[in-house]
Amino acid sequence: MKSSSSRIMMDFPDIFNPVYILSGSIVLSTMILWYCRRRRNSQKLYTAGFFYNPNQLNSYVYENCKSLSTQCKPTFLFSNGHIQSILASYLSPVKLTSRREYIDLTDGGHIALDWIEETPNLSEDAPIIIVLPTLTGDLDSCSRFCHQAHLRGYRSVVFNKRGHGNTELKVPKLQGFGETLDLRQAIEHIHKEFPQARLAIIGSSAGSGLMSSYLGEYSSSAIVETGVAISPGYDMVSLFGYQLPRLYEFILLFNLKKILKQHQDKLGHIVNYSSALSSWSFSEYDYHVYSKFGGQSSALQYWKENNPMRDAGKITVPVLLISSLDDPVCVKENIPFDKLPENETFMLVTTDKGGHCGFLEGWSLTSWSDRLALDYIDTILKYKSENKAE
């Protein structure tokens, strides 16, 4: 037994051998340096600030858009990203005087435009902001922004997708996440009605995805002069595939299903309602619903074909992107920090606080992102006027 024990002890490597000590030190130092560099890069990547390609237009905006030098500063009781997101969803809407207009589409369907008419005597050339709500939003969800736009002399109009905003479906079809033809026909109609007015567009969350798809697909013929995206999702494949937290996925789908139920009489022969209403992931829901209208074989194919950034390189008008690093829905990992600086048309603002479509400050819960969006549009239109005059 003693000789066996002695033999085993002799088989162990000499851990105090200088070669082993040197090799171990090199490996350990390399691992520590790698970890520290990765941590430093990660902290640098997810930093609140302003990111842009310093061309003539962007430099002008940086110098003249006052809100860009500020950060969203919520009251400490409401600073949590989840609280910001919930408050933004449940704030009481501002009561506005509005007029609904239905636009007939080429396939027999229609969409509704809600015009804000707080100031009925606006001039025919007053600039117009086209507002694209969130995934299931409507005029009420956009009313606070529309009110602020009205105070600045803008004419604002809310675009309601097919079947949204309590509109009836005339044909059995819902508008896909990134399908732009309906929006195109609405913008052409607006431009025809107010040919002298300059047009801007703003989208929140899913609305920003539709905006990005439209600006990229129509590029230089988009008609609008600038756009703003609040809490955009950027990459639909990554977001809906694995980044969206389950709780928020459940809430979003619950609200989508309420709209779907309103149109069962029109869609029952296309959509399997039993499967759709029992789906609690976007992968299942989009396969049972939206892929049926677009002819895609899977939710993944639907996401790829409707991805908001699919034609981002073709966007020719200046666009401001506003994202919060504590957004619990469109999470910070989805922000393409490495790609955006390459595009001269994009300007990205990130904040530490703000949640999803929140950015609410003070006890009055006023929106910092609304103020920034309007300041940005003001600045872009001013720049274009000055350069046109030259």
Image (spheres, grey):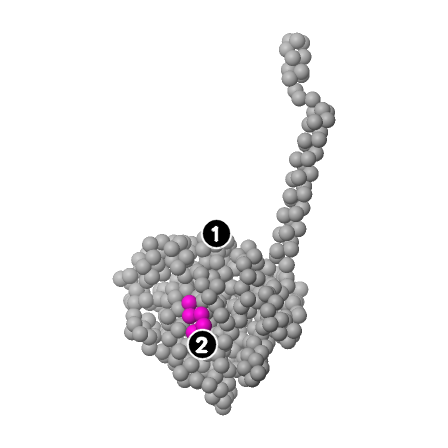
Residue for badge 1: 242
The residue lying at 55 percent from left, 55 percent from top is 333
Query: In the figure, residue 261 lies in which quadrant?
Result: bottom left
Find the residue positioned furthest to the bottom. 121
Q: Quick check: 18 above or below 150?
A: above
Residue 138: x and y in percent read: 45, 72
- Name the foreground residue: 290 vs 316: 316
Residue 341: x and y in percent read: 57, 62
Q: What is the secondary structure assignment of the residue under circle 1? A: helix
Find the residue positioned furthest to the front. 390
Left or right of 180? Residue 24 is right
Q: Quick check: 277 above or below 153?
A: above
Q: Amino acid at mark 1?
A: Tyr
The residue lying at 60 percent from left, 72 percent from top is 56
Residue for badge 2: 223
Q: Which residues are magenta?
A: 217-223
Q: Quick check: 233 above or below 7?
A: below
> Is residue 220 within the magenta segment?
yes
Q: What is the secondary structure assignment of the residue under circle 2? A: loop
- Name the foreground residue: 210 vs 78: 210
